[in-house]
Amino acid sequence: MKNVTGLALVAALAWSSAAAAESLLARGTYLMNSIVACGNCHTPQTPDGPAPGMELAGQKVFEDPTMTAYAPNITQDRETGIGTWTDAQIITAIREGTRPDGSLIGPPMPFEQYRHMSDRDVQAIVVYLRTVKPVTNTVPKSVYNIPLPPAWGPPVTGVTTPDKADLPAYGTYVAEALGHCNECHTPMVKGRFDFANQKGAGGFQFPGPWGVSVAANITPHEDGIAEYTDAEIEQVVRTGLRPDGSRLMPPMGVHYYKNIAADDMKAIIAYLRALPPVPTPQH
């Protein structure tokens, strides 16, 4: 009887561990294919969406006088990707912007937002990354014509996910720590995002094969979303279709954002409504 009981306990513990891992994978799959959308930068994109067979294999994402930025290969390839990195090293790279060799990762990776990603959510992303097939794809190093800081901040530990019932806190968490919306929608001053004065004001330019797209003002200013209904905001985020019938251009990640859960979309809209109204900067 003791042996049977012991085996049953071991089986139960194994099942519990598997269920927990499965839960992390489900969470990571949701985050990566919706609000976090790492593939929007790290997966080569085509006019029809992500390039088949190249998930997270890296690409050039941005070039202007301040920088030429490449999103690295973050597949499990051991030579050109992150297949040799430990879980802790991946988490440090995501939240603190430091590679295993100690070098600093630069913009546009949004460390000022990712620093606030919860322990569970960043672990879930790592679990998902471990499932991505290795792709051999050598990506150049980014080149910066601006000084980078010695570090993006102190080590990050012990971050919890806000309760969904606390809509202001949860909305900030989803839109900033996960969605890093302000990374694209806030102007840069001397290579750093001007969150203090122009958060969400838009105006950031993205040259690409499509021409030059300009990040929209997402504050409740008359230049922004003041006249949008909640349904119209959701439509723009999920589909890229504005109320006037025009469409957003890349890099707006509608391929991913269409999968955002209803509760998370509600939180994002509440967050946008609460931003200080700021006019779009003039160029």
Image (cartoon, grey):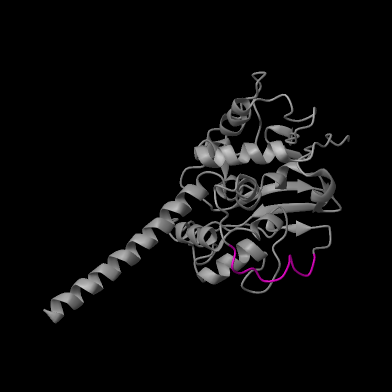
In the drawing, does residue 92 fall left or right of residue 104? left
Closer-to-camera residue (118/194)? 118
Residue at coordinates 56% horizontally, 38% vertically from top-left?
265
* Circle count: 0
Q: Is residue 155 magenta?
A: yes
Magenta span covers which residues? 149-159
Residue 95: percent from the left, percent from the top? Answer: 63, 62
Is the residue 146 above or below the residue 245 in the image?
Answer: below
Q: Residue at x 52, y 40 (%)?
A: 263
Q: Residue 229 colored magenta?
A: no
The picture places residue 9, in percent across and down from the top left corner, at: 23, 73
Q: Nearer the viewer, residue 84 or 272?
A: 272
Residue sitting at the far top: 244
In the rendered image, the residue lying farthest to the right is 283
Instruction: Judge left or right: residue 258 versus residue 68.
Output: left
Q: Is residue 63 above or below residue 262?
A: below
Instruction: Identify the image quadrant of the C terminus.
Output: top right
Residue 215 on image: x %, y %: 74, 36
Residue at the spot 51% in from the left edge and 71% down from the top edge: 86
Main secondary structure found in the magenta portion: loop
282 over 149 or under it: above or below: above
Instruction: Please tell me in which quadrant of the rendered image residue 247 appears.
Output: top right
Is residue 260 visible in the rendered image? The answer is no
**Residue that appears at 67% across and 53% down:** 70
On the rendered image, what quadrant is the N terminus found in?
bottom left
Locate residue 152, reporting x and y percent. 74, 65
| Residue with the most extreme bottom position | 2
Image quadrant assignment for residue 278: top right
